[in-house]
Amino acid sequence: MAKAGKSSTKDLTIGTPWKLIIGFAVPLLLGMLFQQFYSMVDTIIVGRMLGANALAAVGSTGSINFMIVGFCMGVCNGFAIPVSQAFGAGDYRALRKYVANGAVLAVIFAVVITTAVSLLCGQILRWMNTPTDIVDNAQAYISIIFLGIPVTILYNQTSAIIRSLGDSKSPLIFLGISSVLNIVLDLLLVRPMGVAGTALATVTSQAVSGILCLFYMKKKFDILRFQRDDWKLHRRYVINLCNMGIPMGLQYSITAIGSVILQTAVNGLGSVAVASVTASGKISMFFCCPFDALGSTMATYSGQNVGAKKLDRVNAGVKASTVIGAVYSVIAFGVMYLIGREIALLFVDTSETVILNQARRMLLTNVAFYIPLALVNIIRFTIQGMGFSRLAVIAGVCEMIARSIVGFVFVPVFGFAAVCFANPVAWIMADLFLIPAYLLCVRKLRELFREKSEQIPA
């Protein structure tokens, strides 16, 4: 059996859980902040250089972008779960087969998804009741983003595999490089190309980070020295990858369906409301990065420890992550309460008082419910890392139902005030399912491990 290089991989099955979680999560957090930073810069440049209508155009595509690109990201993260479990179990032969088979499946997904959504994106925007004064810009932006799905999959697949082997620092470096490139390209392309320029900048920078991850994997990980047989699609590995990846992708997409429905309701309130939600959403995504980092950390942490049959360490990790998330939630509320409106000034001029006030209102409402959001991310990703991706899909259904009810029923009656409460309601509904689901998963795994130990002859 091949040995894992200590300089490139990290074993999360030994050591103090909270120290390991913080050490693994911080590079992830910095990477996500880089991502959100250049996404925020995109929005700032569009809003400042092209105006509020262009800002609304980009923002109106956010939910459909999340639904499609989120599915791709979910599938890639799901494909990495068997890799982390095989690494935790020390089975490097299976690990290589999972990586290789996952790469072949990723290519197939990239071709099919890119073709389908590129043909349908115009019709989707019309179904979403996108305001006529921004629909052309919206289509110009999202068409390029969808054509870039193959490079989105490349980056997410390679970075997820690197993280599953315990290295969360290297993807951060590559993402930092692409973030700087993205900002430079924004400044060069937005004026001559409009919103299409910022989309092209995003796709190009993602391609660079994906290629860097690919070369790094090839050079640094001795356990990824593939044999020809590794690249053949094996039924067992393909089924396991799809059982992990597709439900995880569907979880993102099903969650996003509720966001699409909510966005459609917001579109009906006009371009000012769309711009307010866009500004608020960009800021909120930046502040939510710690929760995403904790979630991604717990997926790898729980995957490795389940592979090593150390369920007590999984429980300890969940408790430590929850405390970390709760402390951050309190700090975030204080910051948002004091300077939320000033942060919104990054996106629009001081004369846009309605947009500024509505953005601050939505931000404060959302941040007040960050502890439930922390639980959603921590528990859902832990369940996925433990191998129960299908249960995480049900949590996505809960979020979809909540946002759909708000969009269909409450936004037409209460207007923007209802939009502000859509996310908190979705998070609480998801938690009501996830907490008992996690306890069920732990119990099932304990029973499974006990049965296997009893079958081993003394």
Image (cartoon, rainbow, N blue to C red):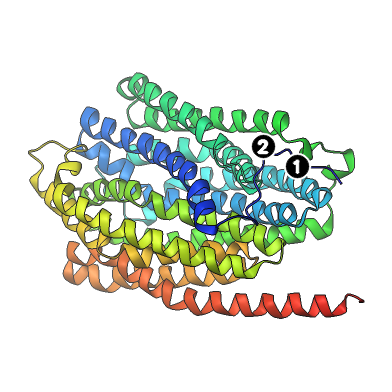
Question: In percent of the image, x 7 and y 39: which residue is there?
Answer: 351
Lateral position of residue 318 relative to residue 11, left or right: left
Mark carried by residue 8: 2
Q: Nearer the viewer, residue 293 or 69?
A: 293
Disc 2 crowd rating (10 Å Cα; few below 14, some 14-19, many 20+) is: some
Above/below status of 173 relative to 431: above
- Mark 2 residue element: loop
| Type of amino acid at the residue the image marks with label 2 | Ser
Residue 6 position in % (x across, y down): 70, 39
Residue 449 found in image quarter: bottom right
- Mark 1 residue element: loop
The reply to whether discs 1 and 2 touch (Cβ–Cβ < 8 Å) is yes
Disc 1 crowd rating (10 Å Cα; few below 14, some 14-19, many 20+) is: some
Q: Is there any visible trace of residue 355 in the rendered image?
A: no
Residue 96 position in % (x across, y down): 79, 45
Question: In percent of the image, x 46 and y 39: which residue is there?
Answer: 31
Residue pointed to by mark 1: 4
| Type of amino acid at the residue the image marks with label 1 | Ala
